[in-house]
Amino acid sequence: MKKQLFVLWVVCCAFQWSTAQLGAAVTTAVDSTQVRIGEQINLTLQVKTDSLSMVEFPPEPQFLPFEIIEESPIDTLRAQQHYLYTKRYALIQFDSGAYWIPPQKITVDGFSKFSDSVAIQVATVVVDTLKQPLFDIKPIQEVERSYTQLIKNIIWGVVFFLLLGLLYYLNKQYQKKKEALLEEIPPFDRALQELKALEDQLPTAQEEYKQYYSRLTDVVRRYLEEEAAIDALESTSDELLEKLELRKDAGTLDLSLETLNNLKKVLQNADLVKFARSAPAIGIATQDRKMVEQVVIETKEALPEPTQEELEATAAFQRELERKRRKQKIQLIGISSLSLVVLAAIGAIAFYGFTPVKDTLFRYPTKVLLDGTWVQSQYGTPPVQLQTPEVLLRNPASTSLTAIYNGGNPFEGVYSQLFFEKRSPEEDKKESSQEEQEAAAREILDAAVERYKALGATNLLVQNDNFTSADGTEALKMTGSLDLTQEGQESLRCRFVSVIFPFETSTVELKIIYPKEDRYGEAIEERILNSLEIIKEL
């Protein structure tokens, strides 16, 4: 007996639930059933159901043989205890005849509903050729190609080659400055450095010997010309030796006979290598380099002592040289740093996009909030754990029955609010029917709308939905848009989100408000909602 009663109860519940679903009515209407070729037909599909039902229109409607020229968004209207969901389509047909607009599948809480099919008569248009002139069909018009992507590729290519050119230019400038600094070194020190560089070179082929001896003789000739004031670079080997002997006889350059003979041997070996294409014996090149180094040293010792004026000029020269080095070093560091900044900026733009990089550099308010350090805390009773860009502070307007925690400003970024309201035991009702549950839900949502109006909101457009928090708690969700005004500023169109938890003894509501056109508001909203959690155990 008990088993039969249980089966009967299940059948009754299922029948009652299916009857509620079947109560949803679908209405089909057109503005005219007789049109002419090319005339627009306005088709309206309307679903009448309760506020908690989920209505889904076909995402890709099929009206063949008619074509869709326009499709409107879903319009929601509250009518007494029901909601009307309306969707409009603009159709067209270019062939005459009798046609049927096919029925469309609409889903209401998982149940399929079908609209009525409508007969449409499409009539031809009579053309009077005597009064209405006829024209040839227009030829095909070529559409101008879009070069947007090509232009972007060209711009990036130009930027890449400009960077390569900049790096090449910086490298050339560095080499020139390096050579200029080398030339500013005193002749004696520079000659010893160049000879030291030749020490690591061991020529083996004829061409290598020629280059080796060319550099070796250039070192000693340049040193003699700069330090001893002898025209050595333009002189032949014999002319150079003759000029040195004349300076020795005049007593202005006291070089020993052995030094002159060593220099003569080196010059002769160099002439044989460069002009007679002969290769010296093994070890001769190294020996000649040592001889040239000794000639440079002895020439430095043989020169007369500099005067006081020359010493002061040399000291001033060294100070000026040091100043130039510091200046060039600072310039090199500055150019290198600027190049790194430019490269980093281009890389960031290529990876993240221009707008995020620009907003980060110029401190876009909501971008700063999104990338900043977020605060995770617990508020009110029952405890609500939430992560927000700024900590929510308790509002002084809170009472023993209501508690408000808020933070932020919708005119400067994102506004967040947690609202707690205690309900008296008299108001607690144990709802047993679906109609009572729907009435209670509508009452809670209406109260939430009134609280928005108390904040100064106008022109509210509301859409209801369901929500599940991170801990699995079911809640009501209300989204939409509204207008806010602030003294001295124009009205601001904002998006708002409310998540409402209707507990037995209290109501908890989370509000999020931010400018509708803000490009980072949606990301902040999603992050806050994902962190929302009701703490059930402490």
Image (cartoon, rainbow, N blue to C red):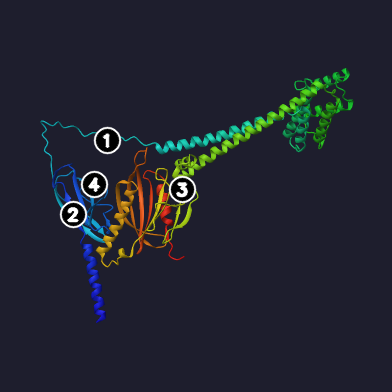
- For the residues labelled 2 and 3, the Cα–Cα distance comes to 46 Å
Frontmost of labels 2 and 4 is 2
How far from the left and from the top, in percent, is residue 264? Answer: 84, 26
The circle on residue 454 is none
Frontmost of labels 2 and 3 is 3
Image quadrant in which you'd find residue 311: top right
The circle on residue 68 is 4
Q: Are marks 1 and 2 in contact (CB under 8 Å)?
A: no
Secondary structure at badge 3 equals helix
Q: Amino acid at mark 2?
A: Thr
Residue assigned mark 1? 140
- State the residue in front, 478 or 190: 478
- The residue at the point 79 percent across, 28 percent down is 188
Q: Are marks 4 and 1 in contact (CB under 8 Å)?
A: no
Mark 1 or mark 2: which comes first in sequence? 2
Residue assigned mark 3? 370
- For the residues labelled 4 and 1, the Cα–Cα distance comes to 24 Å
- Locate residue 193 relative to residue 167 in the image: left or right: right
Q: Are marks 2 and 3 in contact (CB under 8 Å)?
A: no
* Location of residue 502 with respect to 518 vertically, above or below: below
Q: Is there any visible trace of residue 256 in the rendered image?
A: yes
- State the residue in front, 463 or 211: 463
Q: Is there any visible trace of residue 109 in the rendered image?
A: no
Residue assigned mark 2? 27
- For the residues labelled 2 and 4, the Cα–Cα distance comes to 19 Å
Image quadrant in which you'd find residue 257: top right
- Locate residue 201 relative to residue 46 in the image: left or right: right
Give the class, few, some or many, for how many residues have Cα within 10 Å of label 1's Cα (few <14, many ≥20).
few
Q: Amino acid at mark 1?
A: Ile
- State the residue in front, 354 or 507: 507
How far from the left and from the top, in percent, is residue 334? Answer: 60, 34
